[in-house]
Image (cartoon, rainbow, N blue to C red):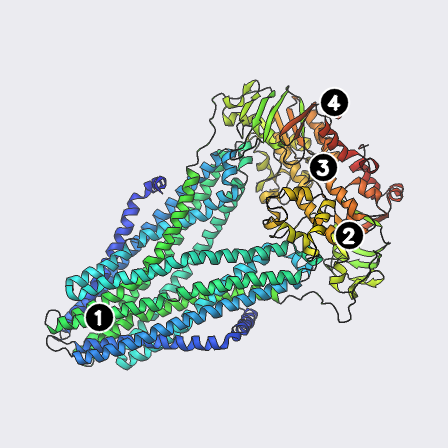
Amino acid sequence: MKSLWKYFKNYKKECVLGPLFKLLEASFELIVPLVVARIVDIAIPSENSGYLIRMCLIMVLLGLVGLGCSLTAQYFSAKAAVGFAAGVKKALFSHVQSLPYQELDRLGTSTLITRLTADVNQMQSGVNMALRLFLRSPFIVFGAMIMAFTINVKAAITFVVVIPALSIVVYGIMLGTIPLYKKVQGKLDKVTGVTRSNLNGVRVIRAFCREETEQKEFAEANTGLTKMQIVVGRISALMNPLTYAIINAGLIWLIYKGAVQVDGGIITQGSLIALVNYMSQILVELVKLANLMILETKSLASAGRIEEVLLTQSSMEEGSVQAEHLIGSVCFDHVSLTYKGCQEEALSDIHFALEPGETLGIIGGTGCGKTSVVNLISRYYDVSKGAVLVDGKDVKEYTFASLREQIASVPQKAVLFSGSLRKNLLWGKSSATEEELLTALERAQAKEFVLAKEGGLDQEVAQGGKNYSGGQRQRLTIARALVKEAPILILDDSASALDYVTDANLRKSIHEMNPRPTTIIVSQRTASVMSADKILVLDDGKQVGIGTHEELLKNCEVYQEIYASQFKTEEEMR
Amino acid sequence: MAKKKLTVEEKRERKATIKKIFHYIGRHKFMLGLSLVCAAASALLALYLPVLIGDAVDFVVGPGKVDFAGLAKVFGKMAIVIGGVVLSQWLMNVCNNRITYKVVRDIRSEAFDKIMNLPLAYLDRHPSGEIVSRVIADVDQFSEGLLLGFSQFFTGVVTIVGTLVFMIRINVLVAIVVVCITPLSLFVAAYIAKSTHDLFIKQSKAKATQTAMIDEMVGNAKLVKAFSYEDEAVEEFHEANEALKKISLRAIFFSSTTNPSTRFINGLVYTSVALFGGFRAMKGLLTVGELTTLLSYANQYTKPFNEISGVITELQNALACASRIFSMMEEPSQIPDGQQATVLEHVTGQVSIEHVDFSYTPSQKLIEDLNLQVSPGQRVAIVGPTGCGKTTIINLLMRFYEINRGKIAVEGQDIAECTRKSLRSSYGMVLQETWLKNATVKENLTMGKPDATMEEIIEACKASHAHSFIKRLPQGYDTVLGEDGGSLSQGQKQLLCIARVMLCLPPMLILDEATSSIDTRTEIKIQKAFLAMMKGRTSFIVAHRLSTIREADIILVMKDGHIIEQGNHTELLSQGGFYSELYNSQFAGVH
């Protein structure tokens, strides 16, 4: 929580004034029983109606001032909480944007999204309620006790017994049920899991005629949940009756003690009523306080999680050289890569060199490290051994932004952002002209279908680009990269949804670009890499071959296998 | 609590929903009765307590004028009342818990049974997330509403009525004053709720915009980096953030005025009781003790009102949830097997499809007059571009969907007249989207043959090339797989699914060949497993591989849901139709 304090900086005033006004309101509330005591002790016995009216006016006045105070307090609390949350959220968002791949992988995107949404919201309401209630509730509880003491010490001793007893019951039940509620949640997750799994596998289940078995399994999970819920319910059902019993037993004792004092002439009847009133005020506030504690525990947990992200340091050091007007040579000098937390190397001893304008194909099975290789060129990860050189310089020497400016990449997952198509394409180069955009679309084999749709370049793209087919989306992401006109172009399995003809045309048009970018094509299809100047064959992170198609067919066993699996005829395969 | 005007239909629907809820609650009549009795008892006894406290105060008049004997009697009564409240409250809570959770259990179980019997047409149309949220989230919300409704609604009403009666008995004038002023508090609460409603809608819109943005920019953080778009993204986020901040402040502040305002009005009620009660007391029409009682009533009189209005929104919510879940439970089930349904036996793999029409929606014709004769042991390849409806054929063969016209027969028997169980267990099915249960490898394998011996299992796994990787799993065949296969690769999952079918080896097969998600070397293994399985069995294959297609006895060429060509490889090529076009574009130049 400590590192988050700074986001309160602009709201210091609100953070002080909010609770302060809340306390003022509470103090007015505590005066009311005294006024009632006056009415009983003075106004009624002396039949002084003027005094009675005056006392009632005081009560209205107390209420009005209290209302004013409390509205002010609510406003300040809301302002501080919302401002604080907005500040945290912005800092968190920019921090996430600045994290390198390694940290993003470790934290996971779904986690980061939860931190930015649910956790920040939880903190916002935590701060808001804390400012409103954290002082108020204890103040009323202890204020009531102190006021009781000012009336009569002997009678007020009851408070000293009742308050801890109530606290023990309220907090004991809450603390006792929290782990049980977690168990309930676990059982509920199980029920959810079974339901979801059954819906996803409905065809298989019906194909194997497993409906009844599954029903039984669900019933079991469901009954387990119900049993647990009833157990927890039984414990929390004690809360109201027990607190009721304690507070009222205390009340009997208080009246008895008070009666003795009244009998001895030490306090008046009105004071006794005031004592009774104070007693009834504490229960409500104690329960409020207990609920607040639960809320604050949750908020603190959220704060901890947010802090963890904010304190995540980038594991990479940025270089200082501006990469400008590169010619695009790429060289891997005995490169190995070990991902953080992994024992084994993801890549070992990768070694090759590419001249400007050359094309490299990378091929291999799933999970063999193809994407890892291209990620090293943009320096999304740091090598653990060797060096990656771009234009003869280690990529570690360049600044991140300038290096990535020089590389146009098309990731495996074809993602577009909501907004116009033009806005998406301009991601590559914000100053691109209409003509440049159209050229890029044409090269990416996308011009035809783009212009066929209503709106042309200004057509709307739905979130994730869902209004396009897989193949169309891939071509648009390729166009977005081509707009950049960078000296290095990386296509990471980004033509998998295209048919062979379109794929071939795409490669041809890239080949005809002037100046031709150094191109790296990652693919599982031999057809896509066959014509490359060099082909890098990976197997389980190891470089098992590099050379042209013909060379590899002669001397690389893995390449032969891959080729055979895709091209051989049925007879030969058997 | 923005009250919407309900149409007649909505009212009728709501009534129907309530009726159905009572049908479930009605199963717990004894508990329900006990709960209601306890609720009434605890509310009334709790109301009697202030009267007793008032009596006690009246025994304590002044120095030397304290009636200790009287006090002792009152204390005794108080102890009994307190004991009664405690007992009845506790009993009520326990009953309510039981009723609620059991009703929820019943509804969930029935909903799940229903899912198992819904036609696939329904399940395919509704995303699984939506159905899960009905069975889980909606039912949860409903249970919360039900529990709250039970605990608070009834006691609230009893308390309000009881307080009124008690107050009138003590002093009519003061009672009237209270009754006249309290509605103010309700009006204020309703007014604030109404005027903040719009703000909340605006707030949730702003929130949704921001969340969508977070989803995009954080979900694709790597892409953002690739294009060095970080600064622009932060800038865009800042704008959304500021907009949300502004609207949130207003929404939160205005809604938080409810409590102070109602508290103020309650203070007014309290003061009026003190004022009018004070005057009455001066005239000796009211004792000080009775005034105390009235004051404490004034304090708690408004509470049940506020609670009830909270409960009513909660209940409305619960009703909405209940009607969503009921609407699913009332969907027509799949047509049950008829009384005379025959059990398919001795299947050799002869399938005939005669004049079959089928469409998912009546307005969009799909399959028209499909005819196909498959002899035992033949291979049928279904080909066509992605999304052309190849799975439709599977849906019909397995009777996941009912055909609109014509007849599909296995061994000459109309499948509509066979039991589903016997039909489906005559087929072995391996789909591209592999599905595995959250259970051990063994349990997953024996899905079709629960009594298989370990030897049989291992043999099947060896035949399907799955044995070697299963052996290497931490607990071998007893390794528990996570939801949807957990850490297994797509290829391994596929091999498991094949082994699963291999174990029961039914006379007919439905296979869906893998596409690009598996690397080609694993694919060879899968292909070999497929070949081993297909030997001597009638098989229907959704085919992507040239070799499979060329080997097939019959090729069904599909486009946009229609079967446009039918024949073997050579026949179709010589026709020069869509198949030859497809063949040339996909595979030309490959040799």
Mark 1 belongs to which subunit? A
Mark 2 surroundings within 10 Å by alpha-carbon count, few (fewer than 14), some (14 through 19), many (20 or more): many
Q: Which mark is residue A551?
A: 4
Mark 2 belongs to which subunit? B
Seen in the image, is B317 located left or right of residue A6? Answer: right
Amino acid on which disc 1 is placed? Trp
> Which residue position holds label 1?
A253
Q: Which mark is residue B509?
A: 2
Amino acid on which disc 4 is placed? Glu
Seen in the image, is A48 located left or right of residue A489? Answer: left
Q: First in sequence, mark 2 or 3: give its number.
A: 2
Spatial distance from mark 4 to mark 1, Cα to Cα? 99 Å
> Which residue position holds label 3?
B520
Q: Secondary structure at mark 2?
A: strand
Asked if the residue at tag 2 contacts the one at tag 1, i.e. Cβ–Cβ closer than 8 Å, the answer is no
Spatial distance from mark 2 to mark 4, Cα to Cα? 42 Å
Asked if the residue at tag 4 contacts the one at tag 3, i.e. Cβ–Cβ closer than 8 Å, the answer is no
Q: Which mark is residue B167?
A: none
Q: Secondary structure at mark 1?
A: helix
Estimate the x, y position of residue B361 in percent, counting from the top left: 72, 58
Amino acid on which disc 3 is placed? Thr
Quadrant of the image containing the C terminus of chain A = top right
Q: Residue at x 72, y 40 (%)?
A: B523
State whether residue A464 is above or below residue A52: above
Quadrant of the image containing the N terminus of chain A = top left
Estimate the x, y position of residue A396 in percent, counting from the top left: 51, 23
Q: Is residue B586 visible?
A: yes
